[in-house]
C-alpha cells in the first residue's frame, strides 16, 4: 500500500519532496495492516490552490486504494516556498484517540 501511494503521488504531482509514512501501528488495527498513512508532499502543482483543493487532489489519487484497505490519510500539502518557510518540517501525529490504543 505504501509503495502504491508513493507511486501514484510521484507520477501525478512530481513532488520536490514526498514522505509516505505508515502510521498504522499507532491505531487499533491488525499487526501488519497498512491502513493509516501520513503523507507529506511538496509540489509546484499546489501553487494557487486552497488547502482543501490540495487535499482533494491527493485524496482523488488515493481513492481506489480505499476499497483495498486504506482507511485514513493525514495530509500535509505544501508548495516549495511553504516547505522552505517551515524549515522542511511537518508536525508529529497525535496519539490515536479511539480504538483502544
Image (spheres, grey):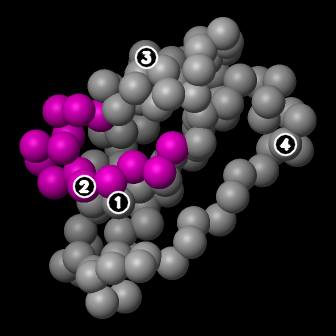
Q: How crowded is mark 2: few (under 14 residues within 10 Å), some or many (20 or more)?
A: few
On screen, 47 above or below 101? above
Q: Nearer the viewer, residue 4 or 24?
A: 24
Q: Does the magenta stretch include residue 68?
A: yes
Q: Nearer the viewer, residue 68 or 82?
A: 82
Disc nearer the start of the sequence (2/4): 2
Q: Residues within 10 Å of mark 4 (few under 14, many from 20)?
A: few
Mark 3 or 4, closer to the camera: 4
Image spot of residue 47 (x, y percent) = 67, 12
- Is residue 8 visible in this depiction of the protein? no
Q: Badge 3 is on which residue?
A: 12
- Magenta range is 62-75
Disc nearer the start of the sequence (1/4): 1
Q: Badge 2 is on which residue?
A: 71
Specify the label residue 36 is tagged with.
1
User: Among all residues in the image, which is located at the extreme bottom?
Assistant: 100
Amino acid at each position: 500500500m505504501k509503495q502504491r501511494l508513493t507511486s501514484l503521488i510521484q507520477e501525478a504531482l512530481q513532488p520536490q519532496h514526498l514522505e509516505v509514512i505508515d502510521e498504522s501501528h499507532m491505531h487499533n488495527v491488525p499487526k501488519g495492516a497498512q491502513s493509516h498513512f501520513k503523507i507529506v508532499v511538496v509540489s509546484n502543482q499546489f501553487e494557487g490552490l486552497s488547502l482543501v483543493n490540495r487535499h482533494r487532489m491527493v485524496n482523488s489519487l488515493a481513492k481506489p486504494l480505499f476499497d483495498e484497505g486504506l482507511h485514513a490519510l493525514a495530509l500535509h500539502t505544501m508548495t516549495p516556498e511553504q516547505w522552505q518557510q517551515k524549515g522542511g518540517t511537518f508536525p508529529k501525529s497525535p496519539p490515536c484517540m479511539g480504538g483502544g490504543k
